[in-house]
Image (tube, rainbow, N blue to C red):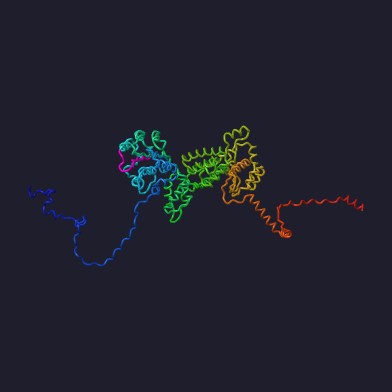
Amino acid sequence: MSDMDPIPPWEDDDTPDAESVERDPDTDDMFGAPAASEPASEPGPDLAPLPEPAPVKDAPSAAYQVLARKYRPTTFEDLIGQEAMVRTLTHAFETGRIAHAFMLTGVRGVGKTTTARLLARALNNQAPGIDKPSLALTPDGRHDAAIMAGQHMDVMEMDAASHTGVGDIREILDSVRYAPVEARYKVYVLDEVHMLSNQAFNALLKTLEEPPPHAKFIFATTEIRKVPVTILSRCQRFDLRRVEPEILIEHLGRVAQKEGMAIERDALALISRAAEGSVRDGLSLLDQALVQGGEGEAVKAEVVRDMLGLADRSRTIALFETLMGGRTPEALEMFRDLYGYGADPVQIMGDLLEHCHAASVAKMLGPEATRLPGDQARVLAALGAGISAGTLARVWQMLLRALEETRRAPNPADAVEMALIRLAYAADLPGPEEALKALKSGEGVGGGGPAPRGGGSSGGGGAQATMAQPRAAAQSALPDPQTFEAMVALIDDKREIALKLDVERYVRPVAFRSGALTFEPAQGTPPDLARKLASRLKDWTGRTWLVAANGQGGGETLIEQERKAREQTRAEVEADPFIRSVLEAFPGAKLGEIRDMAPAVSLPAIPDDPDDDGEADADT
């Protein structure tokens, strides 16, 4: 190679000038080499020291854990509302009659997956003093932490919603033959098992019928009807119930107390109602509600109602009562107020359906069967007592249809208003049997109650317009008491002596208006007094009466008023000076019964006969 040839790049390192290649003076510092010493510089002016940075607050060491996970049950005693299942499993484990497969079913959020994990822990329970399957779970169990975290090698938890094929089941069948590594049983937990394909179910049948003694299967599903019968017949089934509202309210209150937050009981009742028996839904809503509260302030029911977009139940009950009374304009105004406050029209129709159902159930079984707060249950029971079962059934059908129309309508609020108008006019129309009887008797067919009151000349009475003229005239002559005393007088006129005595003795009126009475029942009130009074008043006045025995702070009964008046009169008589002087003049004398004497009848003066006077003078 000649000296003139260029040097190849790969031989560049062997050249003597390789170390003298020019480089960026900051390259050494960039790659971590010690910086070259700088020449001493002349002292410059003193500079002010830089301020130290402000200390940074420590960030939370762990991410926030939602309440539904934080308060997940860790023992069978923590499960709420599932006492029947826990009792059955306790007896089975104590007697050693443990099934090889369990089927857990129920609605969302009632504890199916949690129960499956607790069962896996109970099957492999190994703790100080416990060396057999037992439901007495302890925090220091050997396998507990790994099982609850889903990390135990002998407890396989599979989501059947994402592993639906026969290939996924084949993996289980291939591993089930091998003994557990460290636990007592190999436990296979399949969540949402109804999502498996038919081929996967068929592949599981033989192993599920005759599994190895060291294998246990636990299935969980929300759609039990989609699970083949051949699978169900090989499992021990447990139906997890919805949690009752009272139990869920208490549970949510305890959780809020542990979190150091305050929330009104009415707010907890709204959350429990929205959760529909699901503990997980209730805790998720509680988690959202607690954020709404201020520092040191309790979360108000109004805040939770706005958060959930619900209507006040008492106001929807009042709306239902107005509808049944046929007061159309008032019902429309009430709905618009609810809609203006943010209530969902579909939710309002759903509430009206619930009220119709509650009134029907209370009519047959009493207020306690409605599972509502006491005052609301009594209002709906009184409402049901004054409405026939046929009318309630027709209202139910109309509300069902109105609910579907509201969901499909482009403007749900308009659909609700049209449904309310239709309900107010048709709720009190006679049934087929009543209409047939009216036609046979020659009467016009119309509603048994008043026509819905509307504004102006076009305000209503479409159903009532078909009534015969004599019928309308007769109905206009029916009594319409405007006061409580007038109502009692009407009962007396109808010679209902027993009913009158009950009203005078037990009814403490709270509010009275034409067509509605609210009273506080005195001690010993007959349970059917409100129903009987509403039925009699409807027969006498020709309109529906709403008699509610749910008031508080009512006045005195008529008997109490009469007794008080007698005592006052007696006190006035005893204070009379003449009576006191008589009692003092006759020691031992007592004041007996006091009666109001009838006023003296003044007879007209009879003039003397002039002829008789003349004869008398002549005789003298």
Q: How many marks?
A: 0
Q: Is residue 205 above or below residue 381?
A: above
Is residue 615 in the magenta section?
Answer: no
Residue 456, visible in the rendered structure: no
Q: Position of residue 45 (x, y in %)?
A: 25, 67
Q: Position of residue 404 (x, y in %)?
A: 48, 39
Is residue 188 in the magenta section?
Answer: yes
Viewed as shown, does residue 308 lie left or right of 596?
left
Viewed as shown, does residue 375 lie left or right of 505?
left
Residue 599, visible in the rendered structure: yes
Q: Which residues are magenta?
A: 178-191
Q: Position of residue 568 (x, y in %)?
A: 67, 55
Q: Position of residue 480 (x, y in %)?
A: 63, 44
- Asked where in the image residue 423 lies, by quadrant, the reply is top right
Residue at 74 percent of width and 52 percent of height: 599
Pick the residue in front: 177 or 415: 177
